[in-house]
Amino acid sequence: MSLAHLLQRQALAAPERPALFSGTAPWASYGQWAARSAALARRLRAAGLAPGDRVLLFARNHPRYLEVLWGAWWAGLVVVPVNAKLHPAEVQWIVDDAQARWAFVTADVAPQPLARLERQVELDGAEADALLAAGEPLDIEPRGPDELAWLFYTSGTTGRPKGVMLTQRNLMTMGLAYFADVDAIDRDDLMAYAAPMSHGCGLYAVPHVMAGARHVVPASGGVDPAELFALGRALGPLTTFAAPTIVKRLVDHAQAQGLVPDDAAAAFKTIVYGGAPMYLADIQRALRVMGPRFVQIYGQGETPMTATALARHHLADRTHPRHLERLGSVGVAQTPVQLRVADAQGRPLPPGEVGEVLVRGDSVMRGYWRNPEASAAALRDGWLWTGDVGTLDTDGFLTLKDRSKDLIISGGSNIYPREVEEVLLAAPGVAEAAVVGLPDAEWGEAVVAFVVAAPGAAPTAAALDAHCLAHIARFKRPKRYEFVDALPKNHYGKVLKTVLRERLRG
């Protein structure tokens, strides 16, 4: 079964049902969406594209993104969604590595043609109008469950990105897991695409098409908290996926406007967060300001959006004796996967012991595109070795410590930067913090904290040191504090600790 059957099913059952919106303006019904995607599929195949060929999407968020996505699947093609914030040179590397034949772009992110493509189509142009004009459709190209659907390039914070091969089965599993573990979807729900559609936010189109829900791209094509609150009030409460940095912006807006949880409920049904650490202080504030409309997921591009989930009821259950520990966790294994915290040989560790997080199940990627060495390193005995370090408790809740490469070993003791960051974020006057290790002749590595002060605040090293000594072991506290205006981040909001380490060594 192809993912294209999900759209066809909705179009047959309810062709007049509203499906796509651009801001508050209707864009297409399910029948119109399917007709455009099917017609595009016929034209792609007529142009010589064959099942399995790659089609690049390098564009800002746009309603046509979804039409092209499903049109490519309808034709049996593989989509290569690329973050719109990447430099053209980075995109060109992906074009070449993926051996993409066509690209669909928006002029604001791709003002110049990419090289070595057969055709580059601007989504807002007349050529796209013609390609997507309803006409003679194409029968859906049959695709096996293990055939590629989505080629996702990792963010590449430590070298060239790798192409994660996601299959029809991977994305079907992810979509069904959403219903089982993340949130129920009503056909009147409204999925909002404010975060990049090339990443998790776009992937969540799959379960929302499964349910026949509505889809909206904000007129700005991005994250504007005031716009999103207004959009939810106008069309109905939104569901969206957001990195913690976006959650923080939404909460800041709600607090600045004096909004209460009932106001947030009028604009947002569910905010699924993930993709980077959500610190305890931040989720506590979010729940206090916006109420119980949050769900956390943990996954990777290699097991898209599907490893663990911290459900709404987990977040809301303040009576549980380990409520704070659960708030700091990423939840329990989602239904279609097995989870293990393992030692270096892959053997499961007892509850409470720290090891690498392993995931196994039908959501796990087929491997890395044209990279058998990396595939063999990541996929061993059926398990995905995530590179994340964490612990499982006796109830099955996973708490992430850090990426294995971020572990600091000082004086022979393991120090997990996230633990120190959590403490620093609870200190007065701290808005953001990132902790890294610096080579040290005496200790092996020394703990260094980069701190962004809250507006109007001026925390001192002495005050932060005293705060750390009151909350964590002496050997874990930073030996040095660097006060900075901002932390370097990638296009998905993750702090680039490699840049911080280089800054220290420079």
Image (spheres, rainbow, N blue to C red):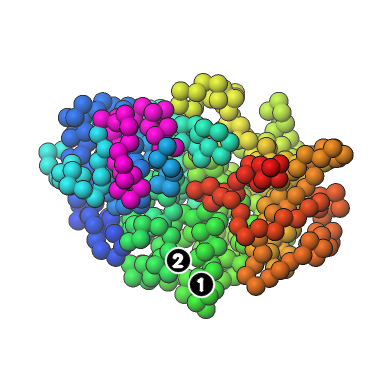
Name the residue that disc number 2 marks: 225
Number of numbered discs overlaid on the protein picture: 2
Residue 104 drawn above or below residue 471: above
Q: Looking at this rendering, what residue extends furthest in the left direction?
A: 136
In this rendering, would 95 be left or right of 38?
right
Amino acid type at circle 1 is Ala
Q: Secondary structure at mark 2?
A: helix
Name the residue that disc number 1 marks: 254
> Residue at 42% across / 37% down in the picture?
89
Can residue 77 be seen here? The reply is no
In this rendering, would 87 be left or right of 331?
left
| Residue closer to the observer: 38 or 351 | 38
Can residue 490 be seen here? The reply is yes
In this rendering, would 58 be left or right of 244?
left
| Residue closer to the observer: 441 or 274 | 441
Quarter of the image with the C terminus in it: top right
> Residue at 46% across / 70% down in the picture?
265
Query: Are the two marked residues, 1 and 2, in contact with CB atoms closer than 8 angstroms?
Result: yes
Can you tell which quarter of the image residue 130 is in? top left
Magenta residues span 90-118
The spot of residue 403 in percent (x, y) is 65, 40
Q: Is residue 419 magenta?
A: no
> Residue at 53% across / 47% down in the picture?
490
Residue 98's label in the rendered image is none
The spot of residue 168 in percent (x, y) is 38, 34
Quarter of the image with the N terminus in it: top left
Marks 1 and 2, the one that precedes in the sequence = 2
Q: Residues within 10 Å of mark 2 (few under 14, many from 20)?
A: some
The spot of residue 362 in percent (x, y) is 48, 33
- Report how far apart the C-alphas of labels 1 and 2 lie in the structure: 8 Å
> Residue at 55% across / 25% down in the picture?
374
Q: Is residue 94 magenta?
A: yes
